[in-house]
Image (cartoon, helix red, strand yellow):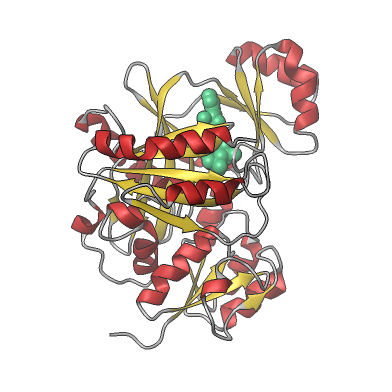
Amino acid sequence: MWNSPKVGILGGGQLGRMLVESANRLNIQANVLDADNAPAKQISFHDGHVTGSFKEREAVRKLAESCDVITAEIEHVDTYALEEVASKVRVEPSWQAIRTIQNKFDQKEHLRKYDIPMADHRELSDNTPEELAKIGEQLGYPMMLKSKTMAYDGRGNFRVNSKEDIPEALEALKDRPLYAEKWAYFKMELAVMVIKTKDDVLSYPTVETVQEDSICKLVYAPARNVPDAINQKAQALARKAVSAFEGKGAFGVEMFLLEDNSLMLCELASRIHNSGHWTIEGCALSQFDSHIRAIMDLPIPPKSLELRQPSIMLNIIGGATPDSHLKATEAALSIPNASIHLYSKGAAKPGRKMGHVTVTAATMHEAETMIQPLITVVDDMRA
Ligand code: ATP
Ligand code: MG
Ligand code: MG
C-alpha cells in the first residue's frame, strides 16, 4: 500500500501521543521532536525521535531529514524553521497557515477577508492605560484583553469589567503583544473539527464545549438542544474559516452561539484539538486517524466522521492535590461505558491536563446520567 512512510511531529504532549496511537495502527512511524520522556515518545519505541524543542531551528532541521511529511501538535512552533525545511519535506498544514493562526490577531485579520463573523476587536500599539481606555469607550465593558501570541487555556486573556480594571489587566499581560475584544454574550460555546484533505474540506458534527476558568472541561457531542439547522450552519462556518488557510490536516474551530442563534468565531487552531477527543470513541475515524490520513493523502470516507453514539468527554485536570487526577481516574474505572485516557505527564499541577474520559451511550440523557458521578468527583477535587 505504501512504503514505510515516516511522519514527523513537532511536540510530544497528549495530542502528539494520541496521534502516535493512530499512526501506530497503520504501521506509520511517527518521529517525535520533544524532550526524551515526552508522553508521545513513551508509547513509541524506535530510533527516529529527535531530542529538543519545536522552537529550536536545528532540531526541526534534524526532524525534517528523517521524515516524508512533518506536522505539529501545537501552533506555537518556529514557523521560520518550518519555512526553511519546506523546500525539502512536506509540511502540513502549511507554515504560512500556522504562522498566521499562531497570532490570534493576525488570524482574525486574515479571516475578516473571508467574511467570517467575529467579535469586534482593536489592536493595541503601545499598551498604555490611555490607549486601552480609548478602546474601552469604543468596545464597551466588559471587554476581553487578549495576548496575540502564546495563548492557551485562557492564559493570555484578561476580562476587563470597567475602566478601573485597566491597570491590573495591563500588568497581568505585561510585555505581550495585545488586542482587545468586544464581549460576546453567548448562550453556548460550540466547536467543530474540520479535516482538510488534498481535495476536500470535511467536518465532524458540532459539539458543545463547557469551559471552567477558561479551560475546556466538558464536551458534549452532539451539542445539546441545538437544532440540526444550527449544527449544519456551524459546520459550514467552520469549513469556510478553515478553507481560508493552506495545507492539510485537522483544524479545531471554536465558536460562540449567541442569543439570537447567530454564530461567531472565537478562534481556530491549526491542529488536532481538545474539543475533538470524543471522536476516538464517538466516530469510526477519530480526529487523530483523520489527521494522519489527511497529511498522507489516504482516503477518508466522510461517513466515518459521523457520530456513532452520543458522547461526553470530561477532562481530568490537575486539582488541589498532586494525586487528584488519580482519584478521578479511580472513580472513572467504575463508570459504565467510560473510556479512560491518561497522558503520562508525571506530577499534576493545578490546571494541567492529565487525561480525559469519554462516555458514550444510546442517548445523550443516558450518557449524562452515567458520567454525572465522575463530574461530582472532579468538582470536589478542584484546585
Ligand atoms: P485555547 O486553550 O482554546 O487555545 P485561548 O487561551 O486561546 O484558549 P480563547 O479561546 O480566546 O483563549 O478564550 C478562552 C475562553 O474565554 C473562551 O472559550 C470563552 O469562554 C472566553 N472568551 C474568549 N473571548 C471572549 C469574548 N470576546 N467574550 C466572552 N468570552 C470570551
Ligand atoms: Mg487558543
Ligand atoms: Mg480557545
Q: Residue at the bottom extreme?
A: 3
In the image, residue 304 sits, relative to residue 258, either above or below, namely below
The image quarter in which residue 136 lies: top right
Horizontal and vertical percent position of residue 129: 79, 20
The image quarter in which residue 160 lies: top right
The image quarter in which residue 1 lies: bottom left
Horizontal and vertical percent position of residue 321: 68, 43
Q: Give the left or right position of residue 302, taking residue 21 as reference.
A: left
Q: Is residue 244 visible?
A: no
Depth check: give the residue in front, 379 or 40: 379
Depth check: give the residue in front, 7 or 104: 7
Residue located 44% across and 43% down the image: 314
Residue located 66% across and 51% down the image: 348
In the image, residue 274 sits, relative to residue 298, either above or below, namely above
Residue located 75% across and 33% down the image: 173
Horizontal and vertical percent position of residue 74: 56, 56
In the image, residue 231 sits, relative to residue 78, either above or below, namely above
Residue located 26% across and 54% down the image: 305
Q: Is residue 295 visible?
A: yes
Q: Give the left or right position of residue 117, taking residue 152 as reference.
A: left
Depth check: give the residue in front, 335 or 310: 335
